[in-house]
Amino acid sequence: MTETPNPNIVDADSLTGEMHPIRRVVVALGSNLGERFAALQGAVDALADTPDFFVTGVSPVYETEPVDSPVEDAPKFLNAVVLADTTLPAARLMERALAVEDAFDRERSEVRNAPRTLDVDLIVVGDRRADDDFLRLPHPRAHERAFVLQPWHDLEPDATFPDRGAIADLLAEIDGSGITKRDDLVLEVQ
């Protein structure tokens, strides 16, 4: 990422006096059930309304073929990426992502990559690393997904994926044929 905030800069919580580092966050959004665009816009609105979460960019919307879907003829996804700066801990961001999904009737099942009304994935939270059942950072498969890399690249052409390299180089290595930019759909930050 190009402008990772200085980890030595902190934000003091005015009520508790706690110090929290400001982190750059990359969030991927996707929907392939129901009102897809409305779900993405609702997710952007909900993220922008999150205290101590400051949206700094929203990518163009892409329509993409489902990847590894267990459902034959699964509907296409709409995807986008949101960039933000935050002082929130990664676990709290994950809780917020799950709450936003729940608000849009996301049904979870044991079936991986099943169609869904909304997917809110934390891709990168500063330089935070996590590998447990609740939170994995950086996202373990995002560096292989054109539907994450292309919108992120649109926002930050010189961004890098932690431990993987430049987004532009990663994009050059993967198949991007199933992804189409939708200029007729524009997500806005209120």
Image (spheres, helix red, strand yellow):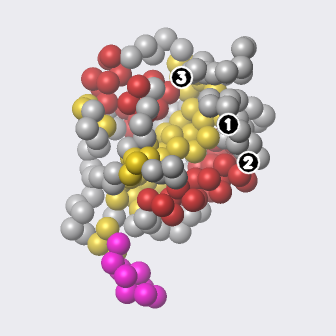
Query: Most prominent secondary structure in the magenta stretch?
Result: loop
Image quadrant holding the N terminus, namely: top left
Q: Tell me the CA gap for discs 1 and 3.
A: 31 Å
Q: Could you say where residue 119 lies in the image, as x and y percent from the top left?
A: 61, 40
Q: Which residue is mark 2?
A: 104
Residue interval drawn in magenta: 12-20
Q: N-terminal of the two: label 1 or label 3? A: 1
Q: N-terminal of the two: label 2 or label 3? A: 2
- Seen in the picture, residue 138 relative to 128 is either above or below; the reply is above
Callout 3: SS: strand
Q: Tell me the CA gap for discs 2 and 3.
A: 24 Å
Q: Which residue is mark 1?
A: 110
Which is nearer the eye, 25 or 154?
25
Q: Which mark is residue 181?
A: 3
Q: Amino acid at mark 1?
A: Glu
Q: Could you say where residue 176 lies in the image, as x and y percent from the top left?
A: 45, 16
Image quadrant holding the C terminus, namely: bottom right
Q: Amino acid at mark 2?
A: Phe
Q: Could you say where residue 185 lies in the image, as x and y percent from the top left?
A: 62, 32
Label 3: few (<14), some (14–19) or many (≥20) C-alpha neighbours in 10 Å: some
Q: Amino acid at mark 3?
A: Lys
